[in-house]
Amino acid sequence: MSHDPAIRRLSSRVVYENRWMTVREDEIERLDGSRGIYGVVDKTDFALVIPAENGGFHLVEEYRYPIGRRAWGFPQGSFPAGRTGTPEELARHELAEETGFRAGTMTPLGYLHCAQGTSGQGFHAYLATGLKPGEHAREVEEQDMRQRFVTRAEFRALIRDGSITDDSTVAAYTLLALYEES
């Protein structure tokens, strides 16, 4: 089996950049020699946290501009510009920032890619237990964020009725189910 890439990059240029992402256009060559372009969104990896207690989860809801509506999901995000750390440190940071909770235990559930057709960005999923409440410290972009506890049955109902459409939240829930099976 060949390990040669099916697509080879010939050149690359940045077409847009801000503090959250870079969009580049790559000139590519396919295995058959045909050429084309590929648009890629470069974003840093993020952490997603499943804050679990009492048979359910704490979710956050905020207005998501690209889809034009409010949506529920698990707390998630990346480090602010200029700050770095381990994936677990990031998960702890996001949990405290968005919910105010501090986790006694942070269990890694896995790593997934979230939009592999357009980006190399991925996320580390964690299960947060032993939650201790505190004050959240949301960023200005999160000023409309709400928080709520849901049972597992309510969580599944939110997926079914379209209130949760975030692929990372649903994928992390699958990782949790696999973890609980083992």
Image (cartoon, rainbow, N blue to C red):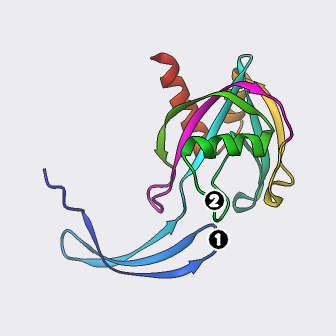
**Residue drawn at x 48%, y 76% as measured from the top left:** 24
Residue 46, percent from left and from top: 58, 51
- Give the mark nearest the N terminus, 1 or 2: 1
Which residue position is annotated with label 1? 19
Q: Secondary structure at mark 1?
A: loop
Q: Quadrant of the C terminus?
A: top left
The residue closer to the viewer here, 182 or 92, is 92
Please tell me how crowded label 1 is: few (under 14), some (14-19), or many (20+) other residues with Cα within 10 Å. few
Residue 159, percent from left and from top: 67, 35
Marks 1 and 2, Cα distance to the nearest angstrom?
A: 13 Å
Please tell me how crowded label 2 is: few (under 14), some (14-19), or many (20+) other residues with Cα within 10 Å. few
Asked if one can make out residue 77 in the rendered structure from this viewpoint, the answer is: yes
Classify residue 96 as left or right of residue 22: right
The part of the chain drawn in magenta is: 114-135
**Residue drawn at x 33%, y 78% as measured from the top left:** 36
Classify residue 48 as left or right of residue 5: right
Asked if one can make out residue 164 in the rendered structure from this viewpoint, the answer is: no
- Above or below, 71 relative to 79: above
**Count of numbered tags:** 2
The residue closer to the viewer here, 87 or 115, is 87
Q: Secondary structure at mark 2?
A: loop
**Residue drawn at x 63%, y 54% as measured from the top left:** 78
Residue 77 magenta-drawn? no
User: Residue 63's mark?
Assistant: none
User: Residue 83's mark?
Assistant: 2
**Residue drawn at x 54%, y 63% as measured from the top left:** 43
